Image: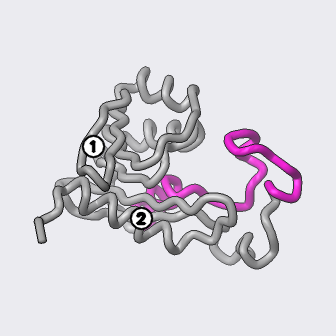
Amino acid sequence: MERPSWQQYFMEMAYLASKRSTCLRRKVGAVLIRDNQIIATGYNGSPKGVPHCEDIGCLREQQKVPSGKNQELCRGVHAEQNAIIQAAINGSSTRGAILYCTNQPCSICARLIINAEIKTVYIAEPYPDELGEELFREAGVELIQFDLQSNTLKKLI
């Protein structure tokens, strides 16, 4: 068995984190890295102490909100947000960190990533959000798609 690349290693961990998700629509995982060390992980789901969508149903499905629209109409906290929050709770700086995420961040998460001073984001799956991409471009955040199967990289921004 061949030793995995750093990108493969951390992306597989992001997929492992996504298995904890309680979202009914999309299971997303994220891993924050600095100096090839994990500083935090996150997955999408309801805030602490709040009922999960898998238990009470999906607000977005109930209101027929299309994917990528009205993201504020959701009980869930995104995986990227939870990873950044977890780093803060544990006192770990995100300045200069790398984020691995199973899906491309939305524009809301892009703003948090930029202000958290995360400089590179690796994604497995694209997610069409032109504003998020524009914000990354303007802030100088690299967005790189990583294909786990072929272990190849494609720079998007």
The magenta-colored residue range is 60-89
Q: Could you tell me which residue is drawn at 41 percent across and 44 percent down?
A: 116
At numbered mark 2, what does the secondary structure look like: helix, strand or loop?
A: helix
Amino acid type shown at disc 2: Tyr
In this rendering, is residue 126 above or below 63?
above
* Residue 106 as seen in the image, left or right of residue 49: left
Position of residue 2 measured from the top left corner of the image (x, y, whole percent): 11, 66
User: Which mark is first along the chain, 1 or 2?
Assistant: 2
Q: Which mark is residue 14?
A: none
Say if the magenta span includes residue 85: yes
Q: Which mark is residue 96?
A: 1
Choose top left, top right, bottom left or bottom right for residue 83.
Answer: bottom left
Position of residue 155 measured from the top left corner of the image (x, y, whole percent): 31, 32
Amino acid type shown at disc 1: Gly
Q: Quadrant of the C terminus?
A: top left
Callout 1: 10 Å neighbours few (<14), some, many (20+)?
Answer: some
Q: Could you tell me which residue is drawn at 43 percent across and 21 percent down?
A: 138
In this rendering, is residue 92 above or below 115?
below
* Residue 110 as seen in the image, left or right of residue 116: right
Q: Nearer the viewer, residue 149 or 154?
A: 149
* Residue 60 as seen in the image, left or right of residue 125: right
Position of residue 113 measured from the top left corner of the image (x, y, whole percent): 45, 42
Q: Which mark is residue 15?
A: 2
Say if the magenta span includes residue 36: no
Query: Given the current orientation, which residue lies at the most extreme left position?
Result: 2
In this picture the colour scheme is: one colour
CB under 8 Å between callouts 2 and 1? no
Q: Could you tell me which residue is drawn at 33 percent across and 58 percent down?
A: 11
